[in-house]
Image: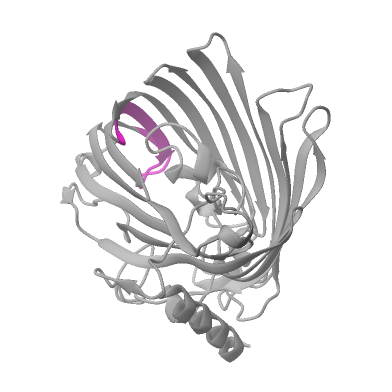
Amino acid sequence: MRQRMTRLAMGLLALGGMAPVAWTQAAWAQEAPAPEVRLGAGFVPHVSGELAVDLYGVSTYRAPSRNDRFRDLYAKAALSAGLHLAENVVIQGVLKFEPVAGGPTGGQDRAFQDQGAWIDALYAEWRADPRLTLTAGKFTAPFGRGWDNLPGIRLTDQVSMYEITESIGVMARATVVDDADGWGEHRLSAAVFTFDTTSLSSTAVTRKRFGRDEADRYRRNSRGLGGAGNTGNLDNAALALEGERIGALPGFTYQVAVLSRGAGSDGRAREWGTAIGASWEIPWTEEISTTLFAEAVRFRNAGGRPVEDVDGVPTPIAERRTVTTLAAQTTYGPWRGSIGWQVEDRNRSANGVARSSYLEATVGRELGLGFTADIGWSRTRAGTEEGGRGSTDAALVLLGWRQGF
């Protein structure tokens, strides 16, 4: 199976090499924005996409201990594009450049260190019918949407743990209801996949070694990393129903999704996840509007019931993990203000983890020419090494730039 998946991935990579690696994803669906319409015989193969660069600054000025205080500067960039081979065939992908390790530790500051680059997605998409799209390659499985569409500065980072990236397999998306004047538009997405351990998972620039470094991403994925979904077989699945343009609820969108992933080399059981999320845009005037966000995600056998050391005895850990997010953003012309709250509960059979929560408030505006600026404040409450919980306050800054092509 691994050899077949490797040949599939390398074939897609060779085809994608005809254009810049690219990917563009809607706020709650694995779909690129519609390309420029070029009908009939007048269609010309072309490339479209976007370059996005964000610079983050985080300064913790209040923490449980001095070692928890730090200043962190880092960048997140994504080069996304699509090679449109025909009106209904496109090669999509994304090249990302982000930190591959967590924030500073031991009271040390960090400035643009641990930055790595990798192919986050590379897949072929065929619109077989106006109501049916088929996808094959490396993509993000359709589960949850907070990691992509929450407002603020770092709110999306807090829920990245249920962004099901590194998924290589096949996916189908079908429009099951399309009634813009009444019931709205509703789409069903289904994906079957495995964790990508091919050469597409390689990391450049900063290459952390598994077993030697503590990192969020290593030089290349392997079965030895373990983790739910890392099985080497197409035995993981995600199913999502999402909708919008509902006549009785203008501005309302939703997603309901389920996920099932097999245990990796360090696990003992299959992981199951459910996600329910919604957003609702409320226009007050022509210039002022508020968008409300809510999402709840729960995992049973989180991580695939991994084996951990409990009093010197290797023990499978049963965990029920729940992440809940509430947020709101109000815009007034080029200005915006947002507030968001998240809480994570981890009910474990052993090696307990304290409940953690995150609160963030930000204000920002569009500056023109694709530039944006935001400033904010956050408070994180989590377990401490001494036991109990402590609070960490941080000042936040975000400078962004986006340019389409």
Which residue, as the protein is rendered here, is positioned at the far front? 41
Which of the 4 image quadrants contains residue 285? top right
Left or right: residue 231 compared with residue 51: right
Quarter in which the N terminus is drawn:
bottom right
Residue 56 in the image: above or below residue 268: above
* Residue at the (50%, 65%) spot, across then down: 45
The residue lying furthest to the bottom in this view is 3
Q: Determine whether 238 is above or below 76 in the image.
A: below
Q: Is residue 173 visible?
A: yes
| Residue 382 drawn at (x, y percent) | 42, 39
**Residue 167 coordinates in the image, percent (x, y):** 57, 67
**Residue that lies at the very extreme toward the top in this rendered image:** 285
Q: Residue drawn 52% across and 39% down? A: 149
Question: In the drawing, does residue 62 fall left or right of residue 52?
Answer: left
Where residue 340 appears, x then y in whole percent? 48, 28
Q: Assess whether residue 386 is covered by the magenta stretch.
A: yes
Residue displayed at 76% across by 29% down: 246
- Considering depth in this image, is 12 or 319 the residue closer to the camera? 12
Total tally of numbered discs in the picture: 0
Decide whether the magenta segment is chiefly helix, strand or loop. strand
Q: Is residue 33 magenta?
A: no
Q: Is residue 190 left or right of residue 61?
A: right
**Can residue 82 be seen?**
no
Residue 74, above or below 342: below
Q: Which residues are magenta?
A: 370-391
